Amino acid sequence: MSSLTSALTTTSLSQQMFSLASSTFRLAASALTRLQQQQEQCQAELASLAHLPEYSLEQVSWHDRPDDCWIVLNDKVYNVTKLVHNHPGGMEVMMEQAGRDATLAFRSVGHSIDAIEQVDEFLVGILPAKERMYLRSRK
Ligand code: HEM
């Protein structure tokens, strides 16, 4: 290989390595920014929920009847007694979750934006910090 070819190959390799390193850096920086934004959103949400009473998963489990039905969604506690009989997805699916953490069941249905916004009207409390899985403070 001539010295010119060898020099060209080395330059092209260096350029590729530089380009790889800079795109890795950009990816890492955007992941970090996204993480910081998520943490800020979480802190803001926690601050907006600070006035709510805390109910443990055990306390929620006492409310597992059609005439007294609570569920947990994303660490927040909802009294859905008034919804049980009018739930568009039916009473049965709701009662399967009564007194429990229904986060995954609720998400797996793929509820509409309207349904997701509707949950706010049933909000009554929040889980204690040690039982939270989604709303975790970094402090
Ligand atoms: C506060 C809690 C809840 C609210 C406000 C709510 C609201 C709704 C609404 C408005 C719909 C009509 C379809 C839509 O707009 O997405 C729906 C459907 C449905 N919901 Fe819920 N829901 C709640 C909790 C749950 C839970 C805990 C489950 C348990 C798995 C569940 C299962 C379903 C099912 C299976 C459907 C029918 C979906 C379909 O036909 O495609 N929902 N819900």
Image (cartoon, helix red, strand yellow):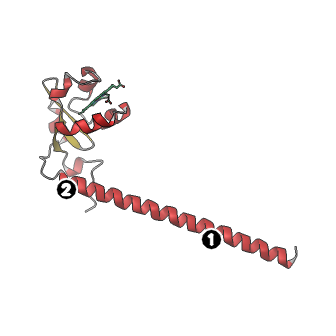
In the image, 59 versus 117, the foreground residue is: 117
Residue displayed at 20% across by 25% down: 84
Residue 44, how many percent across, how many down? 24, 56
The Cα atoms of the two marked residues, 2 and 1, are separated by: 43 Å
User: Callout 1: 10 Å neighbours few (<14), some, many (20+)?
Assistant: few
Other-residue count near label 2 (Cα within 10 Å), few / some / many at <14 / 14–19 / ≥20? few
Q: Which residue is mark 2?
A: 47
Q: State the residue lying farthest toward the front.
A: 114
Q: Quadrant of residue 139?
A: bottom left
What number of labels is visible? 2
Which label number is shown at residue 18?
A: 1
Q: Position of residue 8 (x, y in %)?
A: 78, 74
* Residue positioned 68% across, 72% down in the render: 14
Q: In terms of secondary structure, where does tag 2 sit?
A: helix
Q: Is residue 114 above or below residue 14?
A: above
What label sits on residue 53 in the rendered view? Answer: none
Work out whether residue 39 or residue 117 is closer to the camera in this orientation and state it. 117
Write down the quadrant of residue 43 in the picture: bottom left
- The residue located at (22%, 29%) in the rendering is 98
Q: Residue at x 23, y 47 (%)?
A: 131
Secondary element under disc 1, as helix, strand or loop, is helix
Residue type at the position of mark 1: Phe
Query: What is the three-letter code of the residue carrying label 2?
Result: Ala
* Viewer-side residue, 45 vs 103: 45
